[in-house]
Image: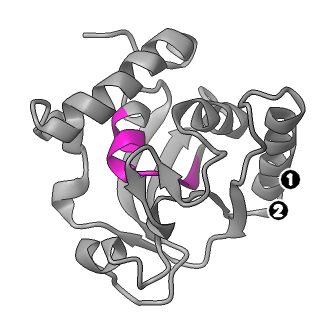
Amino acid sequence: MTETAVLGGGCFWCLDAVYRQMRGIISVTTGYAGGKVDHPTYQQVCSGQTGHAEVVQLTWNSEILDYREILESFFVLHDPTTLNRQGHDIGTQYRSVIFYTSAQQHTVAKEVLQAITDHNLWEAKPVTQLCPLTTFWPAEPEHNNYYAQHPSAGYCQVVIAPKLAKARQTLSHLLLPAG
């Protein structure tokens, strides 16, 4: 059985790179959600004027991976305590947000967010938004699988590669074998 989730945790290239290596993931699509403009472009979203977040849409086999594991890994992959910011990426398009697609996803997201808060996973309280998904707009094709296409690019080396290393260290039980 397949399920779909939409998550925003900073630059979508980072989440895209890690989730593509997770067992049970069928597809990862970069895109935009939560804004007020139809068919936004990367340039429009980066301006901060559309209200969209950079997100990934994940489709996975729920017999291999469950939604709770998707969300638990999400909270390891980004800092959910910084409002509209991930590292040097600043703006509402980089906010921490879970766009839920069902009442069940909303319930699980609230539970996981509460557990993250209760266990003080981060030193500050999470600011992650929980929002119903209205529309997911796919990003331009060049943004999908960006890390694999541009591994030597500066952003990939300085930002994405360390996140992949952290994922290999902390989420190894959820990742496909390296290689």
Question: How far is mark 2 from mark 1, CA to CA?
Answer: 6 Å
Q: Residue at x 18, y 34 (%)?
A: 148
Residue 80 placement: quadrant: top right
Is residue 19 depicted above or below 121 in this figure? below
Which residue occupies the foreground of this view, 12 or 104?
12
The image position of residue 88, as x and y in percent, is 38, 48
Q: Is residue 10 magenta?
A: yes
* Left or right of 48, for residue 130: right
Q: Which mark is residue 107?
A: 1
Q: Residue at x 53, y 38 (%)?
A: 78
The three-letter amino acid code for the residue at tag 2 is Ala
State if disc 1 and disc 2 touch (CB < 8 Å): yes
Is residue 153 depicted above or below 100 in this figure? above
The image position of residue 135, as x and y in percent, is 52, 77
Q: Residue at x 43, y 43 (%)?
A: 87
Which region is colored magenta? 3-17
Q: Which residue is mark 2?
A: 103
Is residue 108 depicted above or below 153 in this figure? below
